[in-house]
């Protein structure tokens, strides 16, 4: 059975900037084990906007890995993510909703440095918090 992780914007930032050695080590271990890295495009967009220019090369390498899958927010997915956000008890960001939706669809944990918004949207979402 193939396993994987869903990366949110905070995880992408940590990988790109080298802020978390653990995140980079996990990425390479997953490559070696042929596990999937799911990158929701909304989280990717947020990460691109928040990382310094010199960190962008690392993000490009991550996106070029054979086990990286971009999860696009298309019309059907937008509808489902929108319903998820509408049912939330409080305000939530689009990228957070998209990440939670991806984690639910695949049954995989979210790699994150910011679990609060994810848990607020779905207390049952499986989280792997970066140290």
Image (cartoon, grey):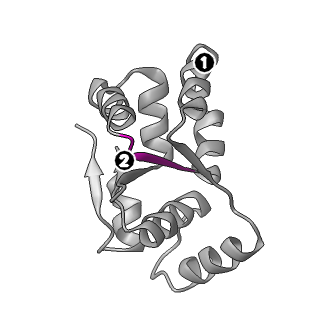
Which residue corresponds to mark 2? 112
Find residue 10 and report its horizontal and vertical position in percent: 44, 42
Find residue 126 and report its horizontal and vertical position in percent: 29, 64
Q: In this view, does 2 lie above or below 63?
A: below
Single out the residue that lies furthest toward the right: 75
The residue segment tinted magenta is 34-39
Looking at the image, tell me whether mark 2 or mark 1 is earlier in sequence order: 1
Q: Determine whether the residue tagged by mark 2 lies in a helix, strand or loop.
A: strand
Question: Which marked residue is nearer to the observer: mark 2 or mark 1?
Answer: 1
Looking at the image, which residue is at 48% across and 76% down? Answer: 90
Depth check, front residue: 100 or 63: 63
Which residue corresponds to mark 1? 57
Depth check, front residue: 121 or 39: 39
Single out the residue that lies furthest toward the left: 131
**Mark 2 vs 1: CB contact within 8 A:** no
Single out the residue that lies furthest toward the front: 1
Locate the N terminus and report the quarter of the image it occupies. Answer: bottom left
Callout 1: few (<14), some (14-19), or many (20+) C-alpha neighbours within 10 Å? Answer: few
Find residue 40 and report its horizontal and vertical position in percent: 58, 53
Locate the C terminus and report the quarter of the image it occupies. Answer: top left
Callout 2: few (<14), some (14-19), or many (20+) C-alpha neighbours within 10 Å? Answer: many
Q: In this view, does 22 lie above or below 57?
A: below
Looking at the image, which residue is at 56% across and 77% down? Answer: 85
Q: Determine whether the residue tagged by mark 1 lies in a helix, strand or loop.
A: helix
Residue 94 in magenta? no
Looking at the image, which residue is at 77% across and 72% down? Answer: 75
As drawn, the label of residue 93 is: none
């Amino acid at each position: 059975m193939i396993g994987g992780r869903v990366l949110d914007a905070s995880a992408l930032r940590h990988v790109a900037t080298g802020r978390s050695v653990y995140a980079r080590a996990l990425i390479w271990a997953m490559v070696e084990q042929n596990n999937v890295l799911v990158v929701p495009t909304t989280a990717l967009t947020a990460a691109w906007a928040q990382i310094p220019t010199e960190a962008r090369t690392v993000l490009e390498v991550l996106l070029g890995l054979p086990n990286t899958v971009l999860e696009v927010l298309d019309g059907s997915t937008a509808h489902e993510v929108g319903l998820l956000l509408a049912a939330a008890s409080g305000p939530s960001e689009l990228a957070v909703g998209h990440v939670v939706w991806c984690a639910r669809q695949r049954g995989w944990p979210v790699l994150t440095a910011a679990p609060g918004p994810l848990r607020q949207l779905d207390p049952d979402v499986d989280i792997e918090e970066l140290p």
